[in-house]
Amino acid sequence: VELLYVKKGKHKVILNGTMKILEKDDILLVKPFEMHTYHYVETSEIYALVLSDSFLGDFYDQAKNEFFDSFLCNKQANRKVLKILDYWYENKAKGSLTNKGFANLLMSELYLTYPLTEVVRTRSQNLIIEVLKYIVENYTENLTLNELSGRFCYSKYYLSKVFNEYVGINFKTYLNAIRLMKVQQILQSEKDVNLLNTVLSCGFGSMRTYYRVLKQEIL
């Protein structure tokens, strides 16, 4: 799940083909299978979080097959969420237990204000959710589209088509983005780490591949 909080200015969002302008103190929640893009409207300041299933497990146990609407625009209530995000940002380096605690606090604050509605997914959406979960759990392995197609019992051509449709980028680009994010997390949270060992442990085959992906991300 992605969360976008607009702290200042305006942000244009296109979600599943619908365009909306988010203003100061608006929140956007994006579920894993939803197509979306972000565009600056004017100089803005935002919080952008990716909340993994490991952070949201307690919430999912409570909510079952329900979730919040995508656009949450009760500005007064959202400012309470902002206080949580500010404090979380100040303490983000204190470990996974702290991060999970902040995630639970954030979702609890939203739960006090906003109703839950049933999430209805198509077969393709359920497939992509399972594929994305598998990638996040196995990004260190030598994953290929052929392996995924065999594991999930779909042709690689169909899986590639659906992946591109819902994620917006191809499988390899997404996989390398996950690996790059994991490398950066380790480098930021640990001291005196060996870059080569970190890169290889996160699934990159070589430093050359890592630098190529890093350059593409920067550009």
Image: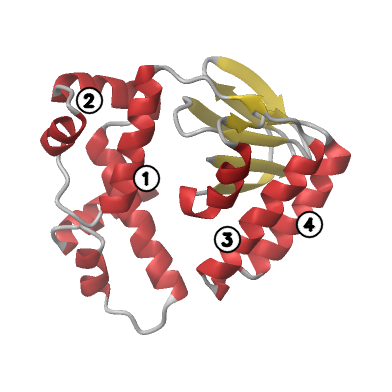
| Residue density around tag 4, few if under 14, some if 14–19, many if 20 or more, within 10 Å | few
Local secondary structure at mark 3: helix
Relative to 145, say whether 139 is above or below: below
Distance in Å between CA atoms under marks 2 and 1: 25 Å
Please give the residue where the numbered disc 3 appears in the rendered image.
Answer: 100
Please give the residue where the numbered disc 1 appears in the rendered image.
Answer: 219
| Residue density around tag 1, few if under 14, some if 14–19, many if 20 or more, within 10 Å | few
Can residue 44 be seen in this snapshot? no
Label 2 or label 3, whichever lies nearer to me, is 3
Q: Earlier in the sequence, mark 1 or mark 4?
A: 4
Distance in Å between CA atoms under marks 3 and 4: 16 Å
Local secondary structure at mark 1: loop
Q: Where on the picture, by quarter, is residue 131?
A: top left
Relative to 93, say whether 55 is above or below: above
Distance in Å between CA atoms under marks 2 and 4: 40 Å
Amino acid on which the number 3 mark rests in the picture: Lys
Label 1 or label 4, whichever lies nearer to me, is 4
Local secondary structure at mark 4: helix
Please give the residue where the numbered disc 4 appears in the rendered image.
Answer: 83
Distance in Å between CA atoms under marks 1 and 4: 33 Å
Q: Which mark is residue 160?
A: 2
Q: Where on the picture, by quarter, is residue 69?
A: top right
Q: Earlier in the sequence, mark 2 or mark 3?
A: 3
Residue ID at (55%, 49%): 56
Q: Position of residue 147 (x, y in %)?
A: 13, 38
Can residue 174 be seen in this snapshot? yes
Amino acid on which the number 2 mark rests in the picture: Ser
Q: Nearer the viewer, residue 38 or 29?
A: 29
Q: Earlier in the sequence, mark 2 or mark 4?
A: 4
